[in-house]
Image: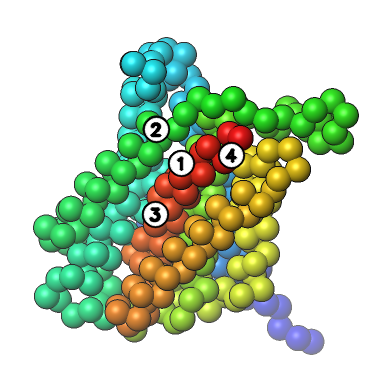
Amino acid sequence: MADAPDSKPPSTKGGLVAALRFLLPLGGDPAPTAGEVVPNMIRWIVPTGFVIGLAWAGTFRIAWKLFGETVGLRVVPSLIVVLIECLFTGALLAMGLARTSHVLTGRQPLRAEPDSLAPLSPVGTLFLCLTVICQYALILSIPAMQGWWPPPNDWRNTFNFMYPAPIYRPLILAPIWGRWGILLAAALGRSAHKADGMTVALNQAMSPGRLILHAIGPFALTAVYCSRGRNVLTGIIVGMLVFGVTYIISVTIARRGGGQTRQSLYAAGQIAQLTFLMTYRAFGRLIQG
């Protein structure tokens, strides 16, 4: 008689918990057996970004009602969203970009895994400050534009309840692209020599096919939220620009640093998130029509 297996396959709940520990500063190792849980964890990366986006939009809406506007700008609501992102939902992404820039420009060996507890160099501190400032400025500058909803004779009119006001749409989309950016970086090249087990397992599990599969959601939602009438190309162009910028920077970081590390994956997520916000603002007039 064959021996019973020593352990059961990781459950869906286990993959979700691992994804939350990987993306949020909850403390502890995301998974003691990374190779087993990562394939199940990957499916939760982008949905977690969607939930974070809903939290952004909900927080912004509540703060807007409580604090109002200042000279036509949502100063306090934007600040509260950035505080939540810096302190919890996106703390690892911002620090990942800062620590990656710290390693790639410092005197220590380029192929070392950035120490999450080591003090930042002046360059790393500068990157961290610029990240927070850029994110706040981009969210603050989102205009309360007149949006487009499918007309009564359009079959999409049935789903009008899923179309939030235009000012909330980039708040929902940005965290989604940020978390997908992590998967994009994991699919590029190899992991660094001193990368942790979770990074190695994620790098090995990602493939071009799996990356494209997880890109369907971000691209589709961006095409819908950035469209006007029958025009869906605007959202596709925005998504392609986010992909192109994140791809180029991630490849550059991986080549200079000798492969991907945990911090470089987070850095790619932060780059994708900022790139989306910048691109959305750049195409604002076209999206508004």
Answer with left or right where residue 233 lies relative to residue 98.
right
- Secondary element at image label 3: helix
What amino acid type is highlighted by mark number 3? Gln
Q: CA distance from mark 2 to mark 1?
A: 8 Å
* Residue under the point 33% across and 29% down: 79
Tell me whether circle 2 and circle 1 mark residues in contact (CB < 8 Å). Answer: yes
Tell me if mark 4 has few (under 14), some (14-19) or many (20+) residues whose alpha carbon lies within 10 angstroms of its own: many
Q: Secondary structure at mark 1?
A: helix
Instruction: Identify the amino acid type marked 2.
Output: Ser
Left-right relation of 184 to 158: left
User: In whole angstroms, how far apart are the C-alphas of marks 3 and 2?
Assistant: 19 Å
Q: Which residue is mark 4?
A: 287
| Crowdedness near tag 2: few (<14), some (14–19) or many (≥20) residues, C-alpha within 10 Å | some
Q: Are marks 3 and 2 in contact (CB under 8 Å)?
A: no
Looking at the image, tell me whether mark 2 or mark 1 is earlier in sequence order: 2
Residue 201 x/y as whole percent: 50, 75
Residue at the (31%, 59%) spot, across then down: 97
In space, the residues marked 4 and 2 are separated at their CA atoms by: 15 Å
Residue at 16% from the left image edge and 60% from the top image edge: 123
Circles 4 and 2: CB distance less than 8 Å? no
Name the image quarter holding the N terminus. Answer: bottom right
Residue to which mark 2 is pinned = 141
Q: Which mark is residue 281?
A: 1
Which residue is tagged 3?
270
Give the Cα distance between marks 1 and 3.
17 Å
